[in-house]
Amino acid sequence: MPDRVLAGRYRLRERLGSGGMGTVWSAVDETLRRDVAVKEIVFPDGLTSEERRVATGRAQREARAAALVDHPGVITVHDVVVEDDRPWIVMELLSGPSLEQTVRRDGPRPPAAVAHIGLQLLDALCAAHAKGIVHRDVKPANVLFARDGHVVLTDFGIASIEADPALTRTGAFVGSPGYAAPERLREQPAGPESDFWSLGATLYMAVEGRSPFERDSPMAVLGAVLREQPAPPRQAGSLSPLLWHLLQKDPSARPGVDVIRQVLHNVAAGRPSGLPDPMPPPPPRRPGALVPVLAGAAMLTVIVLAVVFVAVFAFSGDDQTTAATPTAAPTSPPATTPSASPTSGLDPCSLLTAEQVRRLLADRKSQQEKDSDKSCGWAAKKRGVSLTNLTLGTGGPPPETSVEAHNKFVSWRNARSKASDSVYWGWPEIDVKHVRGSQSAARTVSGIGDEAFAYTTTGLTQPMDKAFVVVRVKHVVIEVEHIYERGTATTDDAAQAARWVAQSLASKT
């Protein structure tokens, strides 16, 4: 198809990429002698001639409407022509990479940088929404970087095509699994809130390096979008609460544009998000347990939303022009405003007393070892105990809210969810030079801190065992490791150490 001329003026050169709705070509406008991009729309098989005619007309109308959106963050649409009974959308040609290509090449972006990207995308979406255009396919591949570094949102052609009932009748899904809002999958009307959901999924990918609903197949992805919570982010930092709120299944539960903008300003400036911590998902219901009354759940949703929007009034920041003005400003921040992270000044050596260490090491003399600010250990002959602050040094900034710490806790638990027969470890100070062991799968432990899980490692080449308990208290996640010669202790000792640590954390945070 290269060298084909459309409408007597647009000569196709090379294919730049393709997706579910067609192919993008580089081309030259031989009339104005400028380089352009041409999106070739490809309809699903099975449409009648009349259905193709109607879909083409809709695409023409919305492409022309998109051309009226005068905003630096929205791709410039030059023309739309019809050939072979389908539309071809002519746009400005950007030579920069997409957000998807950038993340795949360079890795996840820092939260502050992603917040800057989010602000530009939000402004672009608001400009389109003001013209009555809902994008419906916001995703990292449709976010391009111009030569000067600013962000441009492209590919508005799907907006009209997706809305065509003929395509729904054919059973074809138009869009990108993992980035399409749940209401679109349920064939419900898509509004600005749908674009905000997709914005949340896009920012999640930018900061985490993966889709929030990444699965092995497109059908599994669609099922996860409809029924499951997103995978807890590990590197999103203060951006995490906004991502959680944007990815709510119910469009009415997502924050509005003013809230989104203010949170992104806060994160971009290195401040806490200002949003209240989202509640962690409830534990699985026990067999035979009563299902909560629906009205109660609905009331809880209303209360949570009210807290979200009240919290916005207490945001701090330089740009306050876009936030709603309360009738009476609060004299102090609300209780839900995140406090500064306590992890940076926490001394892990202070979490156990000398008497507690003596009990764990069976009254033996011990040598204390401190590894920077994140871990502390006590070693004795064939016995040892160590504490590691997992909220430091695990990638990304320290948690600023309890939900961010919860996300790190979940990521560590998921990493230990499967048993293994090939783990290696050693601790020369307690005469363990090199041990190959068998590790158990993590199991949830109740009654220790806010949440906890435990697992064990049994030495295969030496009679040495290890018991671990990972406990979260508020903003902090601590791993308690107890090493002992088989028969001299039990996993209960590690659990007791974790209880002492949790009590100490509760008094310090």
Image (spheres, helix red, strand yellow):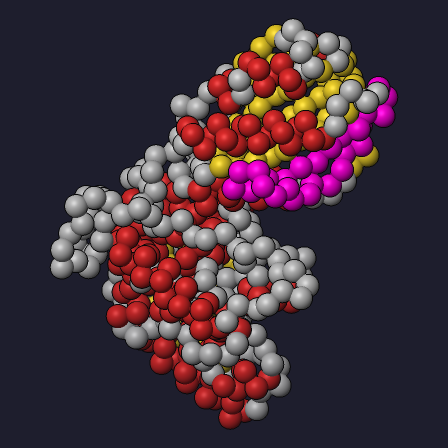
Q: State the image coordinates of residue 264 (x, y, percent, origin top left).
A: 32, 49
Residue 369 in which image quadrant: top right
Residue 265 in view? no
Give the camera-side residue of 172 and 152.
172
Q: Residue at x 36, y 66 (%)?
A: 302
Quarter holding the C terminus is top left
Our reading of the magenta stretch's main secondary structure is strand
Total tally of numbered discs in the picture: 0
Q: Residue at x 55, y 28 (%)?
A: 500
Give the camera-side residue of 318 and 152.
318
Residue 279 in view? yes
- Left or right: where does residue 190 sit relative to residue 170? left
Point out the stretch of residues depicted in magenta: 435-462
Q: Residue at x 63, y 8 (%)?
A: 366
Q: Is residue 361 above or below residue 34?
A: above
Q: State the image coordinates of residue 319 (x, y, percent, origin top left).
A: 19, 48
Q: Is residue 400 above or below residue 37?
A: above
Give the camera-side residue of 459 and 190.
459
Q: Is residue 222 magenta?
A: no
Quarter holding the N terminus is bottom right
Q: Residue at x 58, y 23 (%)?
A: 387
Q: State the image coordinates of residue 276 (x, y, percent, origin top left).
A: 36, 50
Which residue extends farthest bottom? 50
Q: State the image coordinates of residue 323 (x, y, percent, origin top left).
A: 21, 56
- Left or right: where does residue 7 sit relative to residue 407? left
Q: Is residue 450 magenta?
A: yes
